[in-house]
Amino acid sequence: MFLRVFIAFVGLGLVAGAVGLVLKHVLWRRMAELESEERDVLRTEEPELDEFWADRPRAGERPDWAWRVYRVGWAIMTLVYPPIATIWIRTGRLSAHSDVTIVEILAATAGVATYVFVSRWRIRHYRCPRCGGPTVRLEGETPRFSCAHCGIIWNLGNV
């Protein structure tokens, strides 16, 4: 039962994410097709559009796939491993029928808090994956960093 509900939620999340990405790209394309005066009027009427416009794809932008893979891997590990470790320490064995107690819930919460803290630290100290040089964060909700040495804009994806 739990597995079916989990699969349904994951499926709905994937579909909603895909629809959201398509809608964002359609809106960015339509805004790019507007005259600059029309776009400026629209942005003054809706101040939230500044961040949305800043998140548009840019020329010379590359996704940092290593960052994205590590981010997902660490998120899964910090959510799953602490409860597994506490079950193993508490019972001395691992089983699919182990009871989940408040200790495991607290361990998962501590793992997620650690993940949030470490990921924010990593973003503040992000370096160019190609040359290792310092980067400058660009405006927008999606983390993008520009390397002055390489001339590459690195897109870290949604955080």
Image (tube, rainbow, N blue to C red):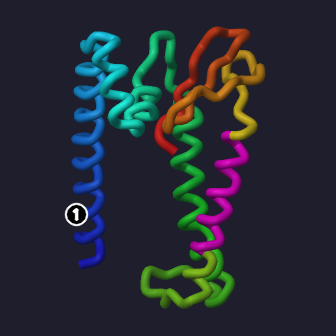
Q: Which region of the structure is painted magenta?
A: 108-123
Which residue matches tag 1? 8
Q: Nearer the viewer, residue 70 or 153?
A: 153
Q: Position of residue 37 (x, y in %)?
A: 33, 13
- Quarter of the image with the N terminus is bottom left
As drawn, 128 above or below 121: above
49 vs 15, left or right, is: right
Figure label count: 1
The picture places residue 134, in percent across and down from the top left corner, at: 76, 23
Q: Give the residue displayed 45% in from the left and 34% down from the top.
A: 51
The image quarter in which residue 66 lies:
top right
The residue carrying pointer 1 sits among few (fewer than 14), some (14 to 19) or many (20 or more) residues within 10 Å by Cα, namely few
Residue at image x 52%, y 45%? 159
Query: Does residue 118 belong to the magenta stretch?
Result: yes
Does residue 112 lie above or below 95 as drawn?
A: above
Query: Relative to the observer, which residue lies in front, 138 or 102?
Result: 138
Q: Amino acid at mark 1?
A: Ala
Q: Secondary structure at mark 1?
A: helix
Q: Nearer the viewer, residue 28 or 70?
A: 28
- Which residue shows up at 61% across the image and 86% down it? 103
| Residue 84 inside the magenta-drawn segment | no
Q: Quadrant of residue 131?
A: top right
The chief SS type of the magenta part is helix
Counting from the top left corner in percent of width and height, residue 23 is at 23, 35
- Identify the residue shown where x is 23% and y is 56%: 12
In screen coordinates, is 48 left or right of 61?
left
Residue 82 sits in which quadrant?
bottom right
Percent position of residue 84, x then y? 58, 74
